[in-house]
Amino acid sequence: MDTEQMSLTSSTEDPSAEGQLEGFSPKEQELIRQLVKERLGKKNAIGYESLSDYYVPPEVYFARIKTPAVNIRARNLEFSMSSIRLFEGVKYVLPMLNEKRKRFTIAICAEEELSSIEWAKLKDDKWVNRTVTCPEYTQDIYRMMEWNGECRYKAYGRLSNSERGLVLVFDLSKAVMYDPLPEEYLDKRTGEMKKRINKYYPDEIRMKLGRSYSDYAAAQRSSSFESLYGYTDTSGSAVPATITEEDAASLSAQDQDRKREALLGSIIGKGENEDG
């Protein structure tokens, strides 16, 4: 048997020779395997995506039927049924305006409050919305916002905590404007004449991609508590407030809950003392 045959027989019979890479020692081969595993692991790892350069689109683009909303016309207000269902069983609310922040907020109140409005009624054992006729008040809103008196506006709301407990907050600066009359147009798909109501978004929304993610995240953190500082009721009187906007924005969720419980406790205690 020649030398070449002996070498072939030896490599075949020797178990330690199986899987070995030609020209590399066992130690070098193990290092290569580890390197390959590391490379494969990096390929399967989930990367990190920074959101710093992203923009979040305006929420009005994705408003749904279940989102609280209010329709404002030159002579009346009408709240959506989703708003009524959030405050199921509530017949009277207190409307408030914040001229500086362009916000419209409603809080639960008793009928006896001077500025209360009846926003819902019981019909066939179900609570339904009702049209609130208040031309003087809505005209104040139109003047404040410099709106077109012939058009209808729709503002979407969010639920928040406040000095008066839960409130609905509507951002009027993001209200959508609707033409007073429908426009006729030709449906190219069917060839029929149809009607539609055109709507228009505010310039600050229409001309931008949205707000930066950092601004969006900051707004999310500060939106769970609405300070009533700077609000006025339907008579134009300032609404009593126990916390400023700046302090409200810095409150954590737990702080907000504790403050709300303390405020409600003091209100209840005051009522009991007066009854006594």
Image (spheres, rainbow, N blue to C red):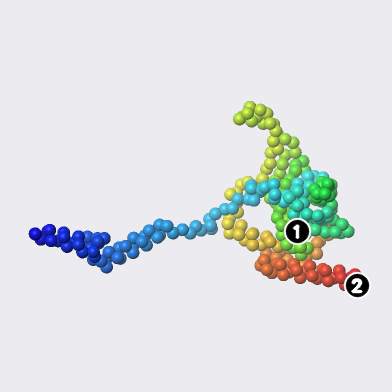
Q: Up-down: is 33 above or below 73?
A: below
Amino acid type at image mark 1 = Val
- At 77% across and 41% down in the image, what residue appears? 150
Q: CA distance from mark 1 to mark 2?
A: 30 Å
Q: Is residue 24 left or right of residue 174?
A: left
Q: Residues within 10 Å of mark 1 (few under 14, many from 20)?
A: many
Q: Residue 17, percent across and down?
A: 23, 63
Residue, disc 1: 167
Residue picked out by circle 2:
276
Name the residue type under label 2: Gly
- Taking the image as drawn, is residue 52 in sight? yes
Looking at the image, residue 171 lies above or below residue 38: above
| Mark 2 neighbour density, 10 Å: few (under 14) some (14–19) many (20 or more) | few
The quarter in which the C terminus is drawn is: bottom right
Asked which secondary structure carries label 2, the reply is loop
Expressed as whole percent of the image width and height from the top left, the position of residue 124 reads 83, 46
